[in-house]
Image (cartoon, helix red, strand yellow):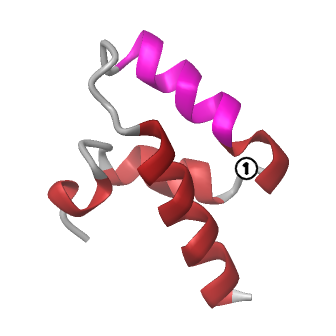
Amino acid sequence: METKQLSGLHVSDFKKLMRIPENEIMGEVIRLNCTRYSNGLDVIRICTLIRQRKHRTT
């Protein structure tokens, strides 16, 4: 999985987000975006990717 596919999110952070309950994903991505990524993430796209991957694996 390349970083470009994750809208700027590092793979390690994506894996952590995959373990978070679905109702908390948006808030956690926003928190990461503000603190670690200096508002450089596409929050909606990342949340959508995480939800899609979770539904594929379950």
**Image point (68%, 81%), residue name:** 55
| Residue of label 1 | 20
| 40 lies above or below 7 | above
- Give the image location of residue 35, x and y in percent: 44, 11
Could you tell me what secondary structure mostly forms the magenta stretch?
A: helix
Residue 28 highlighted magenta (yes or no): yes
Q: How many marks?
A: 1
**Image point (63%, 66%), residue name:** 51
**Image point (74%, 88%), residue name:** 58
Task: Please rate how many residues cluster around mark 1, counting C-alpha atoms within 10 Å: few if below 14, some from 14 to 19, many from 20.
Answer: few
**Image point (32%, 21%), residue name:** 37
Q: Quadrant of residue 42?
A: top left
17 vs 34, left or right, is: right
| 31 lies above or below 53 | above
| 53 lies above or below 8 | below
Query: Furthest residue to the front?
Result: 44
5 and 15: which one is in front? Answer: 5
| 55 lies above or below 42 | below
- Is label 1 in a helix, a strand or a loop? loop
Identify which amino acid the numbered label 1 is placed on: Ile
Residue 9 highlighted magenta (yes or no): no
- Give the image location of residue 19, x and y in percent: 69, 57
Residue range highlighted in magenta: 26-36
2 vs 18, left or right, is: left
- Give the image location of residue 16, x and y in percent: 56, 49
Screen quadrant of the N terminus: bottom left
